[in-house]
Amino acid sequence: MGAAAQPGIVVLISGSGTNLQALIDAVKDGRIPGCIRAVISNRPGVAGLDRAARAGIHHEVINHRDHGDREAFDAALMTGIDAHAPDLVVLAGFMRVLTPDFVGHYAGRLINIHPSLLPAYRGLHTHERALKDGVEGHGCSVHFVNTELDGGPVIIQARVPVLRDDTPNILAARVQQQEHRVYPQVVRWFCQGRLTLADGQVRLDEKTLHTPLQVEADTPLDA
């Protein structure tokens, strides 16, 4: 299959782009049979744009501050995304609450990664909140996006232990290692045609996932 026939991906970022880099690496080494057609940031000058530039990927800024309200920004963002005709839109540290029109426009082809074991700790400061609660396990979740904040059907979760001497930064780094494992895996499944969203339910290899896949830090991932 030639590169032109590969599924197209647009990645949305707001910051340093470490998950973007994991996706770039996975495309480069063939783990993801797709093409990142564009990287779009809502903030100028962020490191993720430099990562895209180094990889030779089209990158641009659609600054939310240039638009009067959330609806106007999302409309501009949809126009920017649709110019690249993606099969999949990947939120990789994209720090914006999306409007229902945006979510509906990309229903079934819009995914996000969140640094907690959803539905626990939706929103911000997940690592601090987990440590404050004294939980034994923490992690990350990849999910299809719906109109609920950090909602939508969860595809996979990676769990890490919470250790006695953890700080928010130490715990975040441990979780981020797992983000860089599971996010490329989910994008791989989607590009292979193995992962879909049907009637609000996740389907992998034509089987409905009634609960998210669960992996530990040392769990081998499906090739």
Image (cartoon, helix red, strand yellow):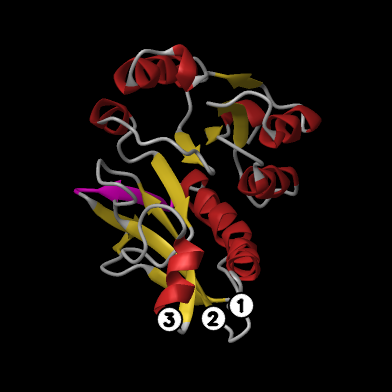
Q: Earlier in the sequence, mark 3 or mark 2?
A: 3
In whole angstroms, how far apart are the C-alphas of marks 1 and 3?
A: 12 Å
Q: Residue at x 61, y 38 (%)?
A: 15
Q: Main secondary structure of the magenta part?
A: strand
Q: Which residue range is magenta in the image?
A: 194-199
Q: Quadrant of the N terminus?
A: top right
Mark 1 residue crowding within 10 angstroms, few (<14) / some (14–19) / many (20+): some
Q: Residue at x 63, y 43 (%)?
A: 20
Relative placement, left or right, of 7 versus 19 is: left
In whole angstroms, how far apart are the C-alphas of marks 2 and 1?
A: 7 Å
Q: Is residue 136 above or below residue 113?
A: below
Say which of marks 2 and 1 sits in front.
Answer: 1
Task: Let me know if residue 22 is in the magenta part.
Answer: no
The answer to whether marks 3 and 2 mark residues whose Cβ atoms lie closer than 8 Å is: yes
Type of amino acid under label 1:
Asp
User: Where's residue 103, x and y in %?
Assistant: 30, 33
Q: Residue at x 52, y 19 (%)?
A: 63
Relative placement, left or right, of 192 versus 39 is: left
Q: Residue at x 47, y 57 (%)?
A: 125
Relative placement, left or right, of 107 versus 169 is: left
Instruction: Give the labeled residue for mark 3.
Output: 135
Task: Let me know if residue 198 is in the magenta part.
Answer: yes
Relative placement, left or right, of 102 versus 183 is: left
Type of amino acid under label 2:
Val
Query: 173 and 192: which one is in front?
Result: 173
Query: 13 and 210: which one is in front?
Result: 13
Instruction: Give the labeled residue for mark 2.
Output: 162
Mark 3 residue crowding within 10 angstroms, few (<14) / some (14–19) / many (20+): few
In whole angstroms, how far apart are the C-alphas of marks 3 and 2?
A: 7 Å
Instruction: Give the labeled residue for mark 1.
Output: 166
